[in-house]
Image: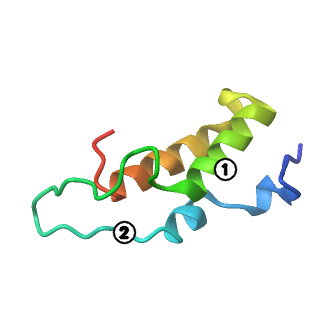
């Protein structure tokens, strides 16, 4: 089965590539407060996650949900 989202096949897309495009906040042993509100962080992975859920349902989109969570954690959110 091949999923297509926004004209791009999902099998060729990778959650890790979406996360790698997001700048990571480096911390020196301490957790810092996020510089953005959670609603504004990680727009790339949020968009992919939301489109997948709308088109295919939450159960089919675990990799995109996990990629978005990983991105949010990298931005300093404790989720």
For numbered disc 2, what is the local secondary structure? Answer: loop
Q: Work out whether residue 7 or residue 37 is closer to the camera in this orientation and state it.
A: 37
14 relative to 67 in the view: left or right? right
The percent coordinates of residue 70 (x first, y second) are 43, 51
Q: Work out whether residue 35 or residue 22 is closer to the camera in this orientation and state it.
A: 35
- Category of crowding for the residue at label 1, using alpha-carbon neighbours closer than 10 angstroms: few (below 14), some (14–19), many (at least 20): many
Q: Residue at x 72, y 61 (%)?
A: 13
Separation of disc 1 and disc 2 at Cα?
A: 19 Å
Which residue has dot 2 on it?
24
38 relative to 62 in the view: left or right? left
19 relative to 30 in the view: left or right? right
The percent coordinates of residue 21 (x first, y second) are 53, 71
44 relative to 51 in the view: left or right? left
The percent coordinates of residue 44 (x first, y second) are 59, 58
Q: Earlier in the sequence, mark 1 or mark 2?
A: 2
Which residue has dot 1 on it?
48
For numbered disc 1, what is the local secondary structure? Answer: helix
Assign the N terminus to one quadrant of the image.
Answer: top right
């Amino acid at each position: 089965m091949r999923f297509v989202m926004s004209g791009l096949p999902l099998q060729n897309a990778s959650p890790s590539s979406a996360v790698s495009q997001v700048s990571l906040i480096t911390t020196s042993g301490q957790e810092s407060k996020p510089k953005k509100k959670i609603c504004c962080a990680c727009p790339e992975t949020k968009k992919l996650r939301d489109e997948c859920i709308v088109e295919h349902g939450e159960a089919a989109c675990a990799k995109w949900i996990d990629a978005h969570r990983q991105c949010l954690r990298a931005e300093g959110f404790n989720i």
